[in-house]
Every structure is written in structure tokens, then in C-alpha cells.
Image (spheres, grey):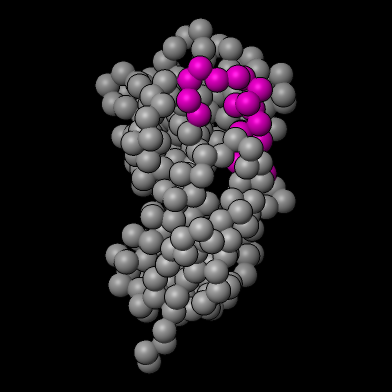
Amino acid sequence: MFRILLVEDDDKLRSLIEGNLAKYGFTPLVVKDFGNVKQEVVSLSPDLVLLDVNLPQYDGFYWCRQIRSFSTVPIIFLSARAGEMDQIMAMENGGDDYVTKPFSLDVLVAKVRSVLRRVYGEYAVPAQGGGVWHVAGLTLNEGRLEVHYQEQLLELSPTEFRLLSMLARRAGRVVKRHELLEGLWDNIEFVDENTLNVNIARVRRKLEELGYAGEIITKRGEGYLLSWKDNA
């Protein structure tokens, strides 16, 4: 059974989520020391984290950054903040999805299942023994979720890696928005299109930080393409 770590300080809501996760066959784990969330993630080693934004001492954005310093475990934010900027911050800090309170418990379970299928199931990048392939000046290691460019290493989250791999495999050609949405999130009914924009921006920035010679180009009304010119 998948282990779901719940980082939520509202006792009533936490209890409801725990019960619903258990009802659907998940193993719910609960953080109680909100001053030491990172260590609890290390010791409990969950398969997915449900992370509230408003927490005592430090907010969820802070703890997401701390978790991302050592782990690519999928993280779904829970928040009463419905603003676009909060959702952008969640993705910029390493989140995989964002659920606005109040929410249906069944919708939350659907999102959890969707992310788990993408990361560990039929749409998942292989956890071990994945292929290594070269395209558009990049070397992509599917097993390690790593990208190499001119001896530099770039570590990506599962979502970021799948996004880049979809673009790289079709370098020079436009990949439609709906193709990316369907490839990244198997149930797009609950996915805000802005989530794709944020992930594109995040991967684009990381490639720029590498000094990558190519770029991700937006084709308005169509999708995105990875442009690569080999100047060697």
C-alpha cells in the first residue's frame, strides 16, 4: 500500500483525510512535529506528501524547498489560498499539484491516485534500470531522473523530467498543449492549465541556468517545442 504523509495542522480536517485515505487502501502517516517536517519525511520515507501551506513556525513553501533538497517524492499542496500567485509559488517551490480548500475528499483521492500512477504506475519514469538516451544536446537518464549537458548535471522532479523528455524526443517539432497535459497528468479534469505553464517555466529556467544552447519556445495557441542548434 502506498504511504501518504499528511502535513496538516487542522485536527478535524486531518482526521477526515486520514480516514478517507485509509478507506481507499492507502496507509496514512501524520506529521505532528511541525518544527521538524524535513526529518519526519526522511524517517518515514512516504510515497507522497500532502502538504498544507499555512503551518506553524514555517509555511508549506519552506518545507517543500527543504524536502526538495534531498527528495523528489511527489508533493500535493493543500491550501485555503485560491490565488494564482500562491499556486505559482507552490509549483516554483517544487510542488506537483495544488488543491484549494474546501475540497471534496473524493477529488483529493483522485488527485492522489493520478500523481501516484504518473510517478510509480503506468505513466511512471522507471525507478531503476531506466534507459539513457541522447537528444538535442542533452543526455537524459530515465532511471535517475537526471539530465546532463556538457558535463553539468541537472536533477529534475518526475514531472519536470517527463515534460523535458516529451519535448526532447520531438525536438524541433511542436508538442501540443493537450498532449503534454495528458502525458503529465493522466486525469486532466482536475488540472489547471496554469500548472503546465508553471512547469514549463521551471524547466526553462533550469536549462538556462545550465547554459543550455537550446530553448523551449512557446507557440501561442499550439504548444511548445524544444529548439536545438548544434554549434559544435
On screen, residue 174 above or below 77? below
Q: Let me know if residue 109 is in the magenta part.
A: yes
- Residue that extends furthest to the bottom in the rendered view of this protein: 232
Location of the N terminus by quadrant is top right
Q: Nearer the viewer, residue 75 or 190?
A: 190
Q: Position of residue 210 (x, y in %)?
A: 32, 69
User: Which residue shows up at 36% across the image and 45% down it?
Assistant: 92
User: Which residue shows up at 42% across the image and 67% down it?
Assistant: 217
Q: Let me know if residue 78 is in the magenta part.
A: no
Location of the C terminus by quadrant is bottom left
| Residue 96 left/right relative to 111 | left
Q: Position of residue 133 (x, y in %)?
A: 57, 75
Q: Position of residue 71 (x, y in %)?
A: 45, 46
Residue 37: quadrant of the picture: top left
Regarding residue 201, the answer to whether it shows in the image is yes
Regarding residue 2, the answer to whether it shows in the image is no
How many discs appear? 0
Q: Position of residue 149 (x, y in %)?
A: 40, 75
Q: Nearer the viewer, residue 3 or 201?
A: 201
Residue 41: quadrant of the picture: top left
Start and end of the magenta stretch? 99-117
- Residue that extends furthest to the front in the rendered view of this protein: 221
Q: Nearer the viewer, residue 78 or 29?
A: 78
| Residue 126 left/right relative to 149 | right
User: Which residue shows up at 44% across the image and 50% down it?
Assistant: 197
Residue 55: quadrant of the picture: top left
| Residue 86 left/right relative to 41 | left
- Residue that extends furthest to the top in the rendered view of this protein: 12
On screen, residue 23 above or below 168? above
Q: Main secondary structure of the magenta part?
A: helix
